[in-house]
Amino acid sequence: MKFEIRHHYTGQIIFECDADSLKLAVEAAVKRKIDLSCASLVGASLIGARLDGARLDGARLDGARLDGAG
């Protein structure tokens, strides 16, 4: 499935890829050192996601599940 991660103010695509889940798409973006600050991740289930080194300052995370993410 194709996922697009968009800037939550402008709607511009920050990162896109084919992945089995949004969690895996976010992990792929982090692995590629994509700046996800101001990304719209509203309602995302990122339980257990590997987010070490992620730039998420200003990201929209309303309702996101981050249990065990690190």
Image (tube, helix red, strand yellow):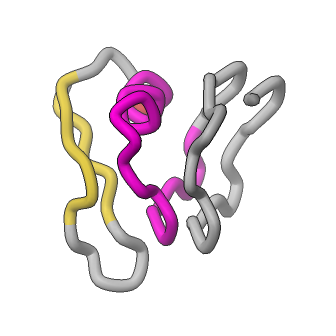
Q: Residue furthest bottom?
A: 9
Q: Nearer the viewer, residue 53 or 11?
A: 53
67 sits left or right of 23 in the view: right
Tally the marks: 0
At 31% across and 62% down in the image, what residue appears? 6
Q: From the viewer's perspective, is residue 18 above or below residue 14?
A: above
Q: Nearer the viewer, residue 31 or 20?
A: 31
At 25% across and 38% down in the image, what residue appears? 3
The image shows residue 69 at horizontal and vertical percentages of 74, 29
Q: Does the magenta segment cover residue 30? A: yes
At 45% across and 63% down in the image, what residue appears? 39
The image shows residue 5 at horizontal and vertical percentages of 32, 52
Q: From the viewer's perspective, is residue 27 above or below residue 36?
A: above
Q: Quadrant of the C terminus?
A: top right
9 sits left or right of 70 in the view: left
The image shows residue 20 at horizontal and vertical percentages of 32, 15
Q: Nearer the viewer, residue 7 or 53?
A: 53
At 59% across and 58% down in the image, what residue appears? 56
Q: Tell me where the magenta segment starts and ends, as one range.
A: 23-44
The image shows residue 25 at horizontal and vertical percentages of 36, 30
Q: Residue furthest top?
A: 20
Q: Quadrant of the N terminus?
A: top left
Q: Does the magenta segment cover residue 25? A: yes
24 sits left or right of 1 in the view: right
